[in-house]
Amino acid sequence: MENSMSNPNDPVVIAGVRKIFNQGKPNQVDALIDIDLTVRAGEFVSLIGPSGCGKSTLLRLIADLLQPSAGTITINGKSAHQARVDQDYGMAFQQSGLFEWRTVARNIELPLELKGWDKAKRRARAVEMLELVKLPEFADHYPWQLSGGMQQRVAIARALAAHPGLLLMDEPFGALDEMTREHMQAELLRICAAAGTTVVFVTHSIPEAVYLADRVVVMSPRPGRITTVVDVALGRDRDELTREASGFFGKVTEVREALRGIELSLEARGIEDR
Amino acid sequence: MTTVERVRRAVALVLPPLLLGVVFLVAWQSWINISHVQPYVVPRPSEIWTSFVNDFELVRRASVVTGMNALVGLVLGSLFGFGIAVLTNRFEVASELVNPLAITIAAVPAVVIVGVLNNMYSLDSQIPRRIMVTISVFFVVFVQVVKGLRQNDATQMELMRSYAATPRQTLRKVRLPNTMPFFFTGVRTAAPLALIIALVSEYFGGTQDGLGSKISGTLSGSNKALGFAYVLGGALVGLIFFAGSNLLEYLVVPWRRRTRSR
């Protein structure tokens, strides 16, 4: 799609990727076909699409939690596997996945601990990250003492603790209420802008995808593939007013129509989406 | 929470069961007074207490013997149960081997083993009883720990993979801490069981210095009050076990203190 413009050292370069589950068996599923996508440094890309479109699978391929059936994935100019071993990326999920036996600070320290950092350095970084997500007074709390939104902020702090250039997020705000969610989106933009972090963000919320992203990648199921890429071009300084700007609505409509087109074509093919 | 509040809550927590206990003892005492039950059939609580105080040294000695048997078995059984569960979880083949075996052995009426063991050790040995307790405790703890090791949070496991953590790191940093509450559920369940097994295994011969032999000996005689005093001794040992295993859990699993601190 845009391979001609891609540079081998871009944070994420996906070329001709295909993912087939249960290959050769009767329950074979073509989860993803013909995926080409390049994410440039500092770019924020949202993946959106109906359930079964393979957006979470694509994120896991980038993270090397799954391996592609065909094609190549290059992260920072190296293989996805090497990138995982080097902890080139941080990851956050819908569930915060905080370890309940560790205090907030020690949760943030875990990836650093696995990298072999010494205690003082780890603690200093945890404190720095807690400042960043505005929870400095909760270092010694246990996760259950925090609200859902606060837990998710800790999860983001943990994902960014090793200062990775790349952040992979799978519906991280999906379980939060609307107000907390909008607040978290703004926080995420602020944090990533401050560190120049590249983000791949899976969501099923159209306004969320548009508000956050430089580009919204619209995907379609059966087989999972990229159908449209919407350039949002709302600029970097987005705030609460952005959500009420007409340009924002225009982009939301564009993404919605792309998704609507997918639904119509599925109906035409007699495929039930749910 | 202010001190006054704290005291008030503690009283509210302790008072109802305490009252119930007092009512029970008063009813027992009055029932015997009214219906003229002979003291060699059922003694009065007051007589049991007198006997407990007068013969405290006898009760204490017997309680220590049985309590030590139960404690040694509880500690060893818990350690084995935990260790072998972790090993079987690490090696899939071992778990397929051990689990059916564990279930089969658990189905054997276990105290019978003590009879066999008694023939293998000298008559004054406490080892057969301790082995018996160890075996019984082992299964309870083993089953709980196996369960705990299998119940891992999917997100946490994916995170560990994204950190490229080794199986060993995942075991140490995720699976084991995750298993601790299960382990302590096992220990708490096994603690009273350990005491019961220690008591009952005294019925199969060997030295007659523990609570089990004293209770069966005195209760079949006419000094029922002393027999009940031994029972009281056993109840106190049971209480110590209960409190001890709870305290240990409180210390080792601090992240589970929520119900207590709220």
Image (cartoon, coloured by chain):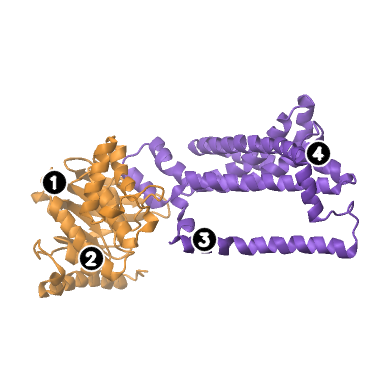
* Of residues A221 and A207, the one drawn nearer to the viewer in this rendering: A207
- Can residue A23 be seen in this snapshot? no
Respond whether the residues carrying marks 1 and 2 are from the same subunit. yes
Which mark lies nearer to you, 2 or 3? 3
Quarter of the image for the C terminus of chain A: give it.
bottom left
Which mark lies nearer to you, 1 or 2? 2
Q: Position of residue A264 (x, y in %)?
A: 27, 73
Check if mark 1's residue and mark 3's residue have beta carbons within 8 Å. Answer: no
Quarter of the image for the N terminus of chain A: give it.
bottom left
- Can residue B140 be seen in this snapshot? yes
Residue under pointer 4: B213
- Is A129 situated above or below B66? below
- Is A252 situated above or below A155? below
Q: For the residue marked with disc 2, what is the amino acid?
A: His
* Of residues A56 and B44, the one drawn nearer to the viewer in this rendering: B44
Chain purple in the figure, letter? B
- Name the secondary structure under disc 4: helix
Q: Position of residue A263 (x, y in %)?
A: 28, 71
> Which mark, residue A10?
1
Residue displayed at 43% across by 62% down = B2
Residue under pointer 3: B7
CA gap, disc 1 and disc 2: 30 Å
> Which shade is chain A?
orange
Query: Which chain is disc 1 placed on?
Result: A
* Of residues B223 and A233, the one drawn nearer to the viewer in this rendering: B223
Residue under pointer 2: A183
